[in-house]
Image (cartoon, helix red, strand yellow):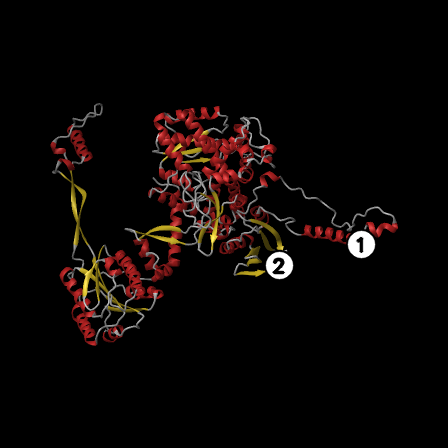
Amino acid sequence: MSDVALKTHLPSYLREWQHRIEEVARGHGLDFFPVVFEILSYDQMNEIAAYGGFPNRYPHWRFGMEYEQLSKSYEYGLSKIYEMVINSNPSYAYLLEGNSVTEQKLVMAHVIAHVDFFKNNFAFRATDLDASGRVDPVRKLENYDPNRKWIDKMANHGQRVRRIIERHGIHKVEEFIDECLSLENLIDPHLPFAGTHVAEVEDENAAIEVPRLRSKDYMDPFINPEDYLDAQRRKIEEARERQKRFPERPERDVLLFLLNHAPLERWERDVLEIIRTEAYYFLPQMQTKIMNEGWASYWHSKIMTEGVLDASEIIDYADRNAGVLATSGGRLNPYKLGVELFRHIEERWNKGQFGREWEECDSLEMKRHWDMRLGLGRKKIFEVRALYNDVTFIDEFLTPEFCHEHKLFSFGWSNRNERYEIESREFKQVKDKLLFQLTNAGNPFIYVEDANFENRGELLLRHEHQGIDLRADWARETLRALVRVWKRPVSVQTIFDGKGTMLRYDGREHTSRLFKSS
Amino acid sequence: MSLRIDQDHSRFRNIVRGKIRQNLRRYISHGELLGRKGKDVVSVPIPQIDIPRFRFADRQQGGVGQGDGEIGDPVGGQEGDRSGQGKAGKDAGDHILEVDVTLDELAQILGEELELPDIEDKGKSKIASTKDRYTGIRRVGPESLRHFKRTYREALKRMIASGTFSPERPVVVPIPDDKRYRSWKTDVEPVANAVIIYMMDVSGSMGDEQKEIVRIESFWIDTWLKSQYKGLESRYIIHDAVAREVDRDTFFYTRESGGTMISSAYKLCLKIIEENYPADEWNIYPFHFSDGDNWSMDDTLTCVELLKQKILPKVNMFGYGQVESPYGSGQFIKDLRELFSKEEKLVTSEIRDKDAIVNSIKEFLGKGK
């Protein structure tokens, strides 16, 4: 750990509170990595926040931009960062110097729950540095104590990039980092759990033989009709044809594909690999934002109000808590949505409002007073925090009643009035929209389709269009970055305004043409 | 304390400067920066600094919100409540970044982009400001200025010389002779003082569009001259058939009607100069904006006389900007150009529309006067 750690350790009265809070948390069944708290002044806090929580990252201007924005909004009194916690083992968390004791306690309780989430939610298994090959999301190990030394890992990345900069100059390297960052979101969230794909080896010279059903001679034209056989033969041929293509099947981890196959210099490969590794590190946090914040908010209020707060602090606490959970201006607050959903689940499982009987009951009156006193709520939410991510969480537990009670709505852009307007309060619309936003962490699905497009060594990507177009100007800029990495023309196949469109950049100019989407 | 982030931050600032330079002409002709001026900084909207990615078009996507409202009601509020978490900035909102740039920096960028020369020192810096610096040491002085360290050093020297100092018991006691006091030196710094006198025609023929042009142009002239002179004053005169001095707000937002007597403004300008700004102490910059539709040739001749005899000898330069009004452009600029073709101090510029502002600024300031 950096030398910062030495100067910023916790004063003893806060250390005592940390012990107390951890005790209460363990009493409730939370299971977390050891947590190291550090106290930072606000500019240190802004610096570390700008670096995404890590005191040591590779140099890049966007961190400077982030820093300027953070410190400006702090100075103007618009916002302040109360806490930051890093998914690593042991976990590091930062407290802001000068906060009141009540605030520090609140933050500590919140952080402990985050760390419990880091340790137990399946998505974060993908960040275990010692996991080899496929990660089993469900099996939980006894004495689970993975290697997640991400502070060191990130610092190493920083060191590597700095060495590269010394040799090649900041300009060149930073420009290349810009390009890699343009592609940062082209990764495959399922990869850590997918294992490696084993290619089926087939003798490619074997003649194409369609298996026939046994039949008597005179029945053969009926049992194995000629046109069926032809169709089968074509299918096999197509499959063979596909195998000649590269990649064989569409590849979602565009970064990995480029890493393996783009003509990169050694240092470029190194940089790209770093960017990809870090992208995968941050991915689980994006996939579980609502759950993670909800879980932490659920537990900070439990822990605080059951044994940690003293009577004189309750107003202060309530004020802060309300600030965290407030929804303003019609915006969805992930803290609020998450905590309310967890509470909703707990209540339903406490009262037995689930399963077939509940689903099939259509008497509103009965449903309203449904209470089987099962008391399964606590157990259920622990299970949910381990086995779900935001998408499955919303998909399974968002109910029409919840939607109605919390006044959720979907909104869209109105061309006529040139503004965003409330579109619907229908459960289905709201849920669809919410799920769409969360799917693939809000990124479009992009695949590497062909690395030898038109037999010219050009790269063809395909955007799997799901109802929303790409942002055209950014797509063109991204193509530019791709060309610089791939060093040959790159095309992306997508849909604009309902028409199949092929965007291409050949290093000099952008072209776009229509094509028939199959 | 120096932070690791400082280097990243300064590279970011360089990128911002580059972006401002790139877009400077647009900023100037759209007048975007006028409303964004604080005391010493301007907040500049920077487009396209984010890293581009494959992502969805914003308007099609929409989202989910929470709260009251009927279907069809507008959704308010801003994206991304930043409080609470350190993960701010991860969700890429389609915000245009606003960056604070100091006026000095902006002037520098303007200077670089338009290749403006620094203004020649006219050598009339008679006004001086004095500054006291505590640099020396004296043997007498008030106790409040006693130099503790030097005093004890003297005492130590004396005690060692006289043999009364023992290293085993290192007690140093100063006597009055040992006392040393800080003393100051007065530096005299010449101050270049400058005054801009803006004059504007507010007669009926000057519309809002024309005033907007004047406003934009004077903002940039202000910015540039401020970076060149330490103390810059601005005076504002409006005129139709009569002239009066007004404050800044009135200057930009008044609209009057009636005829145009340019000489009235020049007379008032001269009066202000003579009363307040002796020409040998001040750098004087009158700028006059009009649509050039003067009342009569007689009045134009009066103006020419005034300029030739009284005003031009006193000022660094005299700028005349003629904006095109819906009623057609006036004759005044042609008269001036004819009669003052050899006069370097008189700079004329025609500003047809907002896009012409950039060139006009260059014409006014490009001579380094």
Q: Callout 1 environment at 10 Å: few (<14), some (14 to 19), or many (20+)?
A: few
Q: Is residue A156 visible?
A: no
Q: What is the secondary structure assignment of the residue under circle 1?
A: helix
Q: Are marks 1 and 2 in contact (CB under 8 Å)?
A: no
Left or right of A86 in this view: A395: right
The answer to whether marks 1 and 2 sit on the same chain is: yes
Q: Quadrant of residue B172?
A: top left
Left or right of A359 in this view: B132: left
The residue that label 1 is drawn on is: A226
Residue A229 in the image: state x and y as whole percent: 78, 52
Q: How many discs mark residues in the rendered view? A: 2
Residue type at numbered disc 1: Glu
Indicate which disc residue A516 carries: 2
Earlier-in-chain disc, 1 versus 2: 1
Residue A249 in the image: state x and y as whole percent: 64, 48
Q: What is the secondary structure assignment of the residue under circle 2?
A: loop
